[in-house]
Amino acid sequence: MRAVGRAAGVRLRDRLAASDPGLLRLTAGLRTVTAIALTLAVLAPLRVPVPQLVAGAIAAMVSTFAVREKQRPAQAVTLALGLPVALASVTLGAVLNRWVVVGDLFFVALIFCAVYGRRFGDRGTALGLIGFQVYFLSLFVQATVRALPALYGAIALAFACSAAARFVLLPHTPAGTLDRLRRAFRARLGRLIATQTELLDAGPDDVEKVLEQLRTDTARLHETALMIQGRLEDGTSDEAVARLLQRRVAEAEIAAERLGLMLLTARSAERTDTLTLHLPGAPVPSGVELPVRDEATAMLRRDLSALRLLVLRPVGEASGTALAQVRNRLLGYREEENLPKASPPVQDVFRGLGEAARAVLGLRIAQEGPQDESDDSPATARSREELDAEDAAIEGSEEVAAEPARRTGLQRPTTRAAVQVAVGSALAIAGGELLSAHRWYWAVLTCWIVFVNTASTGEILVKGYRRLLGTVLGVVAGIGLAGLVGHHTWTAFALVLVFVFAMFYSAPLSYTLMSFFVTAALGLLYTLLNTYSLAVLLLRVEETALGAACGVFAAAVVLPVNTDRRTNELLVTALDKLADLTRAAVGQLSGNPHADLVDKARDLDQALADLRAATQPLTQRLTPMRARRNTARYVVALLETCAYHGRSLAATAELLPTHPSIAADPRLRGVGARIVHTIEAMAAHVRDPRSTAEIETGPSIASMLEPGTLGTPRYGRVTDRVLRHLQRLDEAVTGLARPLGLRVGRATT
């Protein structure tokens, strides 16, 4: 029974890790709620007035979520600096409350400084956020000079409770977060393999649904890989270990995505386009029929389940004779003589299983170190030798990244955002005071919030209407809750804690949902302060709409960055990163010296993530410009397809110094140069539509797929893979020409 319970606990932990990678949302919610609960637990026996309880709760929340550094010493310093900032802010709020004009002018100046402070990194952002939110707190509880000593005590206690929650009760180190992210990667990889198994058995009526789930699981795996990338520097003490884990995660991601494409091809009458995995709503490949019930398919089903078992096996338990036999069988598919008799597409799936098993083995070794090799087959021993040789090559390589060009003056995003928020807040103050002389600050808060993590007018507009929608729904909930709770103080505070947790847990998933929980919690706080009424909640909606409108107006008029300009800038960056990766990968496959291809691949992934976020205003369901929405989705999907093939080429090129089955060939330089020229021509056209750049096409790279064409590899399949990735990359890059409005010419041969 104990073993069953332990296994169930492991499954639950893996499922939670898959839904919340690194448990980052759970940690944020629990820490904040714990800090608030501690503050209230200390203040309650002192029988302090309700406004001080509310002030302590808000200060605990702000001091907890504002601190974002990854290292604990840096967190402690920021928290210590935040206390005097908070005390100064609440003092000025109470003192200036008597002089309306002076107070309004100071609030605008504070907002400008708080946003401008983002240029100084996480600490500047945190201190600015604390200063703004505590000034808002003073307005919310209507702080007076006489009440300042009590407020000082509540705020200081809140910061102490925040420190206790962060460093004592719920301590999380960068290494621990990275470990949880690695578990999440394994869990999501296991989920992706399970979906691939469903694809194998799906009938014609179910294929579209399974394919959509396959896209979702592939995207989630990629998201987790990017999160690991962002935590490697702080989560590992050795740079070589970080680089090794970075590479193994990339290999596992690529192998899993390739396996999905091979399964799609095996189920259809033609080779599946990579775009199918990246474009939402893309049609199902033609020729998909009822699943085949033959011996090869049964073996595939069995081996996909075996691969999932290898992936999900907990760390430290990936040993034993039975497990070694499973691993040996899967790794044996990397040898041509071990492939079962089947059609070529199905044999490709078995090869993909072998490469995925190798990637999982590499990931295990990177996480757990050397393993028991006593039961290894010859194929497994060769895979280990290859991995050991790659590890040695990684430890001996190092590359210093170039610093990006810096902008100055009003071109700097933080300066521009500070000016925009200051102007929008000034308008919100003026308009808000016309609506209410006492609660105008809600308009200012909304104006502030819509500028957080946004960079274009379109993003601000989308965030504004989502906040307004969430506020309206929250008002409806607040009306019902206020009637149920009445004047039961601690029941109301308990519900506030529930809503605060839900707010932080849902924030990365849905801004509308987060706004709903915020407004519902505020309705309860108004009840506690004896200021609740239907008119107050309706005023909250009006102030929210006004603040969002002021934010959008300021973004559109003051130093505007429209969505087209923003997306074009990010599109150019993504194309530049794609060109860099393609040039380096093909160069290394052609015989050039070793380059840090994994870092270049992750730079491309990050550029694509930024572009995907910036195009959200264009791809919203409610956008009236349907053609533009479809074009934006198509361009992003094509770029993701290019990135997949670029990553695959980079992963293969990284094997070149140590893998006996791969040989460099200088003839690839010409193909690579043409593809890079096409990408650079597109980037030049996006920068300046008047550019005369013209892309060139050449003979199909598939024509090179003849035995003995490229080098003298031991296995022809690796050669085929390189050329097919080049062919698909060439096709995808050329496919970008039409939506980007470029002319297509024919290369002279």
Image (cartoon, rainbow, N blue to C red):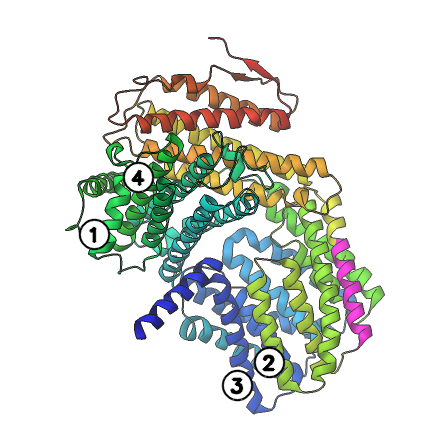
Mark 1 against mark 3, which lies toward the viewer? 1
The answer to the question of whether label 4 and label 3 lie on touching residues, with beta carbons closer than 8 A, is: no
Would you name the residue on which mark 4 appears?
A: 398
The mark nearer the N terminus, 4 or 2, is 4
SS label for mark 3? helix
- From the image, give the main secondary structure of the stretch colored magenta: helix
Would you name the residue on which mark 2 appears?
A: 494
Report the quarter where the N terminus lies: bottom left
Mark number, residue 370: 1
Gap in Å between the C-alphas at discs 4 and 1? 23 Å
Looking at the rendering, the stretch of residues picked out in magenta corresponds to: 533-550
Gap in Å between the C-alphas at discs 1 and 2? 49 Å
The mark nearer the N terminus, 4 or 1, is 1
Gap in Å between the C-alphas at discs 1 and 3? 50 Å
* Rendering quarter of residue 516: bottom right
Q: Is residue 269 left or right of residue 444?
A: left
Gap in Å between the C-alphas at discs 3 and 2? 15 Å
Residue situated in front as seen by the camera: 83 or 295: 295
Would you name the residue on which mark 3 appears?
A: 42
Image coordinates of residue 128 in percent, x first then y, are 58, 61
The mark nearer the N terminus, 1 or 3, is 3
The answer to the question of whether label 4 and label 1 lie on touching residues, with beta carbons closer than 8 A, is: no
What amino acid is labelled 3 in the image?
Answer: Val
User: Does 160 sit above or below residue 272?
Assistant: below
Name, please, the residue furthest toward the top: 749
